[in-house]
């Protein structure tokens, strides 16, 4: 049986050790997730070592024999702009933690454009880098099946007089169906949450929320994540401290 080679462009979102010097790479592309073996990449002199670093955008050449894929070559396209900016580096850590939890589904391929846009904005090293992380988090939740209904009241479907939001009920609430005072939120908070779940990737560069607004919304969405999955995102604490 003869193997074939193919080229793909995407981001390394997960690396798992395999044997002494190999890794299993989870690679997000515009068509979904690929998983392949990268031989010898843990060796310092490996030519492909940098090309499959986490959050690196690369073009990879994969060799397929039967059902198995293995890496032939990885060429960097862009790399995370790590520097001495603690907040920026914490943003990258947050994305790494999120991406490691991606579950492959029919919607997974949609995350590629969101990650690509987010990384592009972060790599510009803008002072405000929490906004793209917040939007990516909302879209991650939506595409993983944990999103909120932000179009109308989840109880009656009314689109006006929205005054609150409930995680347990799964979205926005009108005044009539607001059950607890804790569910009531100010209009600005509701507007930000609505934007994060309903915008397109190209809209990300149009907004810049205040740091305290981003942190509050990130904390709220982390509650949604914890209630939905039972897991906890440890990197959110670093974002809070870095801000």
Image: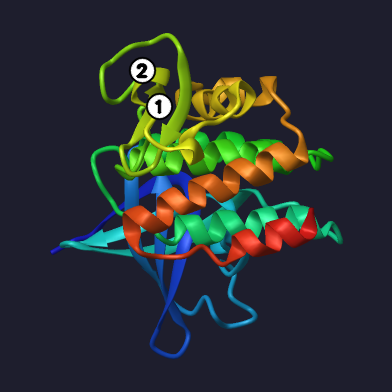
Q: Is residue 187 left or right of residue 161?
A: right
Instruction: Identify the image quadrant of residue 205.
Output: top right
List the single residue furthest toward the top: 160
Q: Residue at x 75, y 52 (%)?
A: 81
Nearer to me, 226 or 143: 226
Q: Residue at x 79, y 38 (%)?
A: 128
Q: Residues within 10 Å of mark 1 (few under 14, many from 20)?
A: many
Q: Residue at x 48, y 80 (%)?
A: 40
* Residue contact at pointers 2 and 1, CB within 8 angstroms: yes
Whether residue 30 is visible: no
Vertical relation: 134 (above or below) 23: above
Q: Residue at x 55, y 59 (%)?
A: 96
Q: Say the numbered circle drawn on residue 150.
A: none
Tell which circle, 2 or 1, labels the residue nearer the N-terminal end: 2
Nearer to me, 141 or 49: 141
**Numbered disc 1: secondary structure:** strand
Vertical relation: 118 (above or below) 176: below
Nearer to me, 35 or 39: 35
Vertical relation: 218 (above or below) 159: below
In percent of width and height, residue 53 lies at 58, 63
Image quadrant holding the N terminus, namely bottom left
Q: Residues within 10 Å of mark 2 (few under 14, many from 20)?
A: some
Whether residue 152 is visible: yes
Q: Is residue 225 left or right of residue 78?
A: left
Q: Say the numbered circle drawn on residue 172.
A: 1
In percent of width and height, residue 35 lies at 33, 60
Residue corresponding to mark 2 = 152
Nearer to me, 148 or 4: 148
List the single residue furthest toward the bottom: 20
Q: Is residue 232 left or right of residue 119?
A: left
In percent of width and height, residue 206 lies at 68, 19
Q: How many marks?
A: 2
């Amino acid at each position: 049986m003869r193997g074939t080679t193919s080229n793909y462009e995407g981001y390394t979102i997960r690396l798992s050790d395999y044997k002494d010097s190999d890794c299993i790479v989870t690679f997000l592309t515009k068509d979904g997730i690929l998983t392949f073996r990268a031989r010898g990449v843990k060796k310092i002199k490996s030519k492909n070592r940098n090309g499959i670093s986490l959050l690196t955008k690369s073009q990879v050449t994969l060799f397929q024999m039967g059902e198995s894929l293995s890496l032939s070559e990885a060429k960097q396209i862009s790399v995370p702009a790590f520097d001495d900016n603690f907040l920026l580096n914490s943003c990258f850590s947050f994305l790494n933690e999120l991406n490691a939890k991606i579950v492959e589904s029919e919607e997974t391929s949609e995350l590629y454009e969101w990650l690509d846009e987010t990384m592009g904005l972060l790599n510009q090293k803008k002072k405000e880098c929490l906004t793209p992380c917040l939007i990516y988090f909302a879209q991650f939740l939506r595409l993983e099946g944990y999103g909120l209904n932000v179009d109308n009241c989840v109880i009656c479907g009314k689109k006006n007089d929205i005054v609150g939001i409930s995680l347990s009920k799964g979205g926005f609430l009108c005044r009539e169906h607001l059950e607890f005072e804790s569910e009531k939120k100010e209009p600005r908070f509701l507007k930000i949450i609505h934007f994060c779940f309903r915008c397109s990737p190209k809209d990300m560069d149009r907004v810049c929320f205040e740091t305290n607004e981003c942190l509050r919304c990130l904390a709220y969405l982390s509650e949604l994540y914890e209630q939905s999955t039972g897991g906890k995102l440890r990197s959110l604490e670093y974002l809070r401290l870095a801000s």
